[in-house]
Image (cartoon, rainbow, N blue to C red):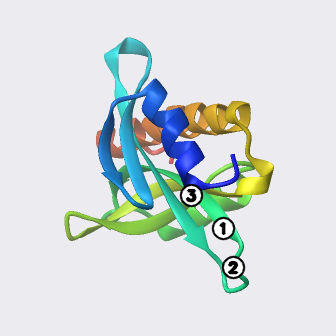
Amino acid sequence: MHHFEAVRSLIGSLHPLRQNDPYLISFDLALPHGRHQGIYLAELEDEGGRRYLRISTPIGPLSGTDPKRCLRFNWEQRNGFLAVADLDGSPYLHLCENRPYELLDQQELRRLIGELGSLGDQLEQVIVSGGDTF
């Protein structure tokens, strides 16, 4: 996996794409119990020209979320971090991971998608139910 087109080719062979833009694709990841989680993959470039793949999944609206809990979650996580992005014009929490292409292969990309999709679904269920564990 050295560029976004290799990612697009792999993901497109595994999942129907909902969004297929030059540097952004998305699809629904099937999870147990008939659940699905939206996954977004985008290419980022840093100031030095190094390219990264961002894997993200929306987990819930930002409103009503305690920022201290979000920061605590980020501190405790080994993979993935919480960030805010607009979704249909509203601030929304996303679970994200950024990886340089040179550290990605097909197996690692599949693992990251599965891990972030599953964790994102769990967090979404907690936020939607108003649970106190997040």
On the image, numbered disc 1 is attached to which residue?
Answer: 51
For label 3, the crowd category at 10 Å Cα-Cα, with few meaning under 14, some 14 to 19 and many 20 or more, is some
Q: Are marks 1 and 2 in contact (CB under 8 Å)?
A: yes
For label 1, the crowd category at 10 Å Cα-Cα, with few meaning under 14, some 14 to 19 and many 20 or more, is some
Note whether 50 is above or below 39 in the view shown: below
Viewer-nearest of labels 3 and 1?
1
The reply to whether residue 117 is visible in this rendering is no
Residue 132 versus residue 32: which sits nearer the camera?
Answer: 32
Residue 47 at what x, y percent from top left?
67, 86
On the image, numbered disc 2 is attached to which residue?
Answer: 49
Tell me the residue at 69%/46% (across/down): 1
Residue 103 versus residue 79: which sits nearer the camera?
Answer: 103
Residue 111 at what x, y percent from top left?
66, 32
Q: Amino acid at mark 2?
A: Gly
Tell me the residue at 40%/60% (across/down): 22
Residue 85 at what x, y percent from top left?
38, 68
**Residue extending furthest top?**
33
The reply to whether residue 37 is visible in this rendering is yes
Note whether 86 is above or below 28 in the view shown: below
Q: Secondary structure under badge 1?
A: strand
Q: Amino acid at mark 1?
A: Arg
Tell me the residue at 56%/40% (across/down): 116
Tell me the residue at 50%/48% (across/down): 134
Residue 107 versus residue 77: which sits nearer the camera?
Answer: 107
Q: Are marks 3 and 2 in contact (CB under 8 Å)?
A: no
**Separation of marks 3 and 2 at Cα, in angstroms:** 15 Å
Query: Is 117 displayed left or right of 78 in the figure?
Result: left
- Residue 3, labelled with which disc? none
- Residue 54, labelled with which disc? 3
Q: Secondary structure under badge 2?
A: loop
